[in-house]
Amino acid sequence: MSASIILQVQGVGKRFGGLQALFDINLELPEGQILGLIGPNGAGKTTLFNAINGVYPPDSGRVTFRGRDITGLPPYGVARLGLARTHQIVRPLNELTVRENVMAGACFGRMDYGLSDAAREADQVMALVGLTPRAGQLAASLNVAQKKRLELARALAAQPYLLLLDEVLAGLNPTEIAEMVQTIRAIRDRGITIFMIEHVMHAVMNVSDRVIVLDYGEQIAEGTPAEVAANPKVIEAYLGDPKLAERLRISDDGPRSEAERG
Amino acid sequence: MNLLRQPGFWLTVLLVLAGGLLAPITQSATVRESMFLVLMFVALASSLNIILGYTGYVSFGHIVFFGLGGYVGFYFLSQQSWSLAPAALMGGLAAALLALLLGLSILRLRGAYFALATIGINEAMRALITNLKIFGGPTGMSLHFSVYQEYGGATQALWITYFAMFGLALVVVVLSFVVKKSKFGLGLVSIREDEDAAMVMGVRAPRAKTWSFVLSAVIPGIIGTLFFFKNGNIEPGDAFRLHLSIETIVMVMLGGQGTVLGPVLGAAGYERLRGFLLTNPTFKDLQLAFAGLALLIIVLFVPAGVVGWLRTRLPRLRRVLE
């Protein structure tokens, strides 16, 4: 797969009143990869997604998607260019059936399908994410895991080039997580680039090609999952205590100094 | 066409047809007058349903389109001596234009703010027209009786208006169905369910909302012209009756917002009930109190209305009860 850059974020910042939610974020996402975005609660992960897909226009910086400047486009403009996303807190269209939800994703996304093509696409995507048995049910009647799948199906039905996944694993049990990780891999194998926010560490470290870490709106680390996991700044951000981080590293690598153990 | 194979489409259309044909079959003026009102409310409620039921925006002052359309159409009838059809089209056009302008400005408001803004617009329009000389100011305008001669006399004119209203009611019902089953309709319902999520999916919400508002305004504008042509005169107090707006909302909610059949049943049911209350000596001043009470009960206990309730209770009938 060619390594052309599908998404480029340059110097993006966002402020809400007195809170600087994002400082000078820079990243590049090569086509066909899975990029993980991690960080403690309130680090600005979802805000970064919102700045990318136009929910909040960034105060500064530029977002380029497939060579096109999309900074400040409304969310529907971004969606129609082939950038789909899911929401951390699921947002099903409750009074519609599962199938209609997925069809809506197909109708208004990149392909701009008519209803009958959208129905065909919806059936395929529902099969991929395992929602076919629920197709005729109202979206409101699904359980959380199924709603997460619905979010994913709706985004996928648009046949996006890039998919932003906002905590699709949160609230799932271990079996469901394993299934969802499988599904995410299957999506990547279809040629869709993925940028995912995730708190379930073993899953995101396992599935991502690269990982970016945010803390208090700042980008504190970037690299392969192994590099990021070993980065003291990251450990500090998660655990809050540099000494503790030091100690954990030692217990991982085996004792290096007797003094540190006490 | 796909539409013609839908049982739900036929049920609704046949209901309107059956009701509308009652008057010509019986040749009774009484039946004609009461069915005229029923058909008018069917068309008004179904129009309102496009913005209220499909798109999820409560247009509280929707009667402004009826009033403005009535005024503009009446102006062309009485001052410019146009005949009914082109005058009514001008009425519809004026209403659509107003909706377009409003759509671009106030449809960005959500929830209660939008509802409040629409009430304000109805009141502002009433005040504006009351002060407009060309529309006759506070006393309004009236048609000379001789105008009806052009249509073969007053009785004939009443029948013509009746059939025009009948045709309009059918058009609105078909339009409601087409919109509901279209991609445009899917976009509207997505906006109703979650506007932000819909935009993230790619629904061009500002544009879709504006068109749905225009679509829901154009027929009330035409109806306004028909109504006041039949009435013979128009004045601000009659054209911009806010309580008529509220009663139309009751009809939509009673029958089932967001369904095609609901507003038809709701309008017919409420109109018949209203007729009974108005002619009953005990209740004759309580008709609006009843409307308020009905709205309260619906919102509290059956927010989906009669058709919505039946759809959840009897899932097998879903294909029929659209």
Image: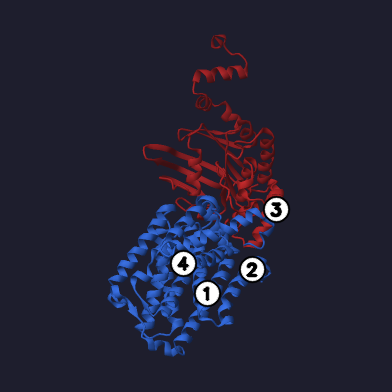
Q: Do discs 4 and 2 belong to a common subunit?
A: yes
Looking at the image, is B164 positioned above or below residue B320? below
Dot 1 corresponds to which residue? B35
Q: Identify the subunit bearing mark 3.
A: A
Mark 2: which amino acid?
A: Leu
Whether tag 3 and tag 4 are in contact, CB under 8 A, the answer is no
| Chain ID for red | A
Q: Nearer the viewer, residue A92 or A178?
A: A92
The residue tagged 3 is A124
Determine if residue B164 is in view.
no
Q: What percent of the width, then of the height, locates residue A59?
A: 40, 45
In three-dimensional space, the C-alpha distance between marks 3 and 4, rounded to whole angstroms, equals: 60 Å
> Do the residues indicated by labels 3 and 2 lie within the same chain of the protein?
no
* Nearer-N-terminus badge (4/2): 2
Name the quadrant containing residue A253: top right
SS at badge 2: helix
User: Which mark is nearer the camera, 3 or 1?
Assistant: 1
Q: Secondary structure at mark 4?
A: loop
From the image, tell me which residue sits under label 2.
Answer: B11
Query: From the viewer's perspective, is the residue at label 4 or at label 2 nearer?
Result: 4
Q: Are marks 2 and 1 in contact (CB under 8 Å)?
A: no
Does B155 appear above or below B221?
Answer: below
Indicate the chain on which mark 1 is placed. Answer: B
Disc 3 to disc 2: CB gap under 8 Å: no
Q: Which mark is residue B119?
A: none
Of the pair B215 and B317, the residue shown nearer to us: B317
Chain of the residue under the numbered disc 2 shown in the image: B
> Residue B135 placed where, x, y %?
32, 76
Q: Amino acid at mark 3?
A: Gln
User: Chain B shown in which color?
Assistant: blue
